[in-house]
Image (spheres, rainbow, N blue to C red):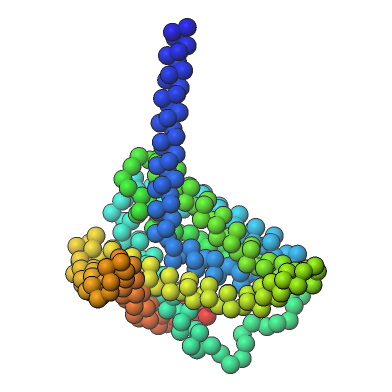
Amino acid sequence: MSGLLSLLDDVAAIAKVAAASIDDVAGQAAKAGAKAAGAVIDDAAVTPKYVHGFEASRELPIVGKIALGSIRNKMLILLPAALALSAFAPWMIAPLLMLGGAYLCYEGAEKIVHAIRKPAHGTHGTAKPSDPAHLEKERVAGAIKTDFILSAEIMTIALSAIPESGFWMEAATLAVVGIGITVAVYGSVAVIVKADDVGLHMASTGRLGLTRAMGRGIVQGMPGFLTLLTLVGTAAMLWVGGAIIVHGLEEMGFAALGHLIHDWAVAVAHAVPAALQGFTEWLATAAMDGVLGLVLGLVLVPITGKLILPLFGKHEAGH
């Protein structure tokens, strides 16, 4: 009997350790996921365009295929690569993170440049494709490739945000971040792409005037919401990209820019009431990081369009 009680005590102790580990994983995953906000918001803003032009019945299946491809990207390729980096080449994490930050700056600036230079004649035809199945396959493949780039940035940011810990803790945290972000992004995308249909249904079949009015409001408001989502995503990319560059420079021993931004943000915060100083300092820091990201991105746009993309046989194109 004493042996059984001892075994039960051991099991209880192991369960407590496991529960604590789960809490640690969840906490680290939440912090790491928050660091990847710019890439996450952009992912949610970009993906709805891939279902544009298809029958309503194909929208959710397409989103599901892209989400499945995203999970494969993160779990089968990027997670092992991140763990290998952490174990064998941790010195590469900061440079890769800065490379990803530069990419976010380029993407954000490119979106702004493309919006300013929007062509007078539409480049995307409105005619229905002669082979919808083939177009769907191409769209899904293109979305998964784009997701791979954004997922690589998300996983690198998450890896850099995880405190030094054991192999399995890092693996579990990255897995939770990868799966959690994928569910959040593509769940949101599914809601966004079906919002019009829900609104139309409410507007046409609602029994109450309020229900019908809400349906009409959803339909009329979705274009503006998508525009707002794109703007927020672009701003977040520039902010996060600029912040990554600043922090990367600090890790490499070039802390002057980070100190300057911090000092200016503190000076701005001191100009407002004490209750608002914390938020104001954060906002000023984010704004300066965003301006830095925009400047860097504007420098990278012509370099990428004229030098880098031609090396891969691609031509500059708007998103």
Residue at 69% over, 61% down = 60
Where residue 300 sits, quadrant-wise, is bottom left
In percent of width and height, residue 118 lies at: 54, 88
In percent of width and height, residue 55 lies at: 75, 70
Residue at 46% over, 84% down = 113
Please say whether residue 127 is visible from this viewpoint.
yes
Image check: 111 left or right of 289?
Answer: right
In percent of width and height, residue 153 lies at: 43, 61
Furthest residue in direction top, as rendered: 1
Please say whether residue 52 is visible from this viewpoint.
no
Where residue 205 sits, quadrant-wise, is bottom right
For this rendering, which residue is in front, 116 or 281? 281
Residue at 34% over, 45% down = 87
Instruction: Report the quarter where the C terminus lies.
Output: bottom right
Work out whether 175 lies above or below 124. above
Image check: 5 left or right of 139?
Answer: left
Q: Please state the total of marks drawn on the protein image.
A: 0
Work out whether 81 lies above or below 5. below
Image check: 244 left or right of 40?
Answer: left
